[in-house]
Amino acid sequence: MAKQNWKAGNMLYPLPAVLVSMQDEKGKNNIITIAWTGTICTNPPMVYISVRPERYSYPVLEKTKEFVINLTTEDMVHATDYCGVTSGKNVDKFKETKLTPFPSKYVQAPSIKESPVNIECRVKEIIKLGSHDMFLAEVLGVTIEDTYLDKDNRFNLDFSNPITYSHGKYYALGKNLGKFGYSIKK
């Protein structure tokens, strides 16, 4: 097996494909698709999203300093793609995708009802990095769809058929290969 050296670049894939919902100061809702997102701290719970400054959503996030990360599913893949290639400047993405906004508990930004998990966030810091700026945010609350609770009343995201993004394509998650710690369990 041969290997090649390439120029520096982002090859950390697959990534979650999430819908980030927000509301501007005038009450207009918008959705942006984000693949550059993740967990940065457990206690306090913190996440990040990275957004290009030229995106329509950027000044909304910068001014309101709040958003909701909505996990996506196979049923939402068309909406996920649409919200990533269409500007909220010209289109009501909730209307066009037939996604349903519903009130969040801790932020003004709406959550997306069709999403199995809604993570309400408040921006703590914006780090200017280059092509994208990172919005570091504290998680204020999480809402889950209770149909994804298993027989033991534990949340099981696998039931929702979550999707990922890799090199310009969306993928369904595959089979379970093991549980955390299985390699040392006796």
Image (cartoon, grey):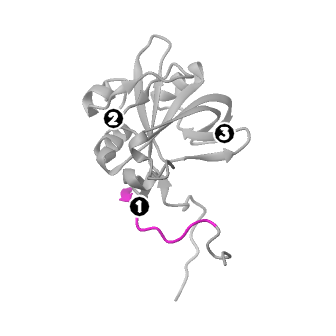
Q: Is residue 99 above or below residue 155?
A: above
Label 2, label 1: how far apart the Cα atoms are: 25 Å
- Report the residue marked by disc 2: 86
Q: Residue under label 3, please give it.
A: 46
| Mark 1, other Cα within 10 Å: few <14 / some 14–19 / many ≥20 | some
Q: Indicate the amino acid at tag 3.
A: Met
Q: Callout 3 environment at 10 Å: few (<14), some (14 to 19), or many (20+)?
A: some
Give the total of numbered labels. Answer: 3
User: Above or below — where is 112 with respect to 131?
Assistant: above
Q: Along the line of sight, which residue is nearer the eye, 133 or 73?
A: 73
Q: Residue furthest front?
A: 152
Q: Amino acid at mark 2?
A: Thr
Return the x and y of residue 153 as percentages of the image width and height.
49, 47
Quarter of the figure with the C terminus: bottom right
**Dot in front, 2 or 1:** 1
Counting residues from the start of the chain, the first of labels 1 and 3 encountered is: 3
> Seen in the image, is 186 located left or right of residue 120?
right
The reply, left or right, for residue 27 in relation to residue 97 is right
What residue is drawn where x is 61% and y is 72%?
182
Q: Position of residue 63 (x, y in %)?
A: 58, 19
Q: Helix or strand or loop: what does disc 2 sit on?
A: loop
Instruction: Name the amino acid type tagged 1.
Output: Leu
**Furthest residue in direction right, as rendered:** 43
The magenta-colored residue range is 169-180
User: Residue at left 55%, top 82%?
Assistant: 3
Q: Is residue 156 left or right of residue 43?
A: left
Residue behind mark 1: 173
Where 126 sits versus 24, above or below? below
Percent from the top left, x then y, of residue 164?
43, 55
Which is nearer the N-term, disc 2 or disc 1? 2
Residue furthest to the bottom in view is: 1
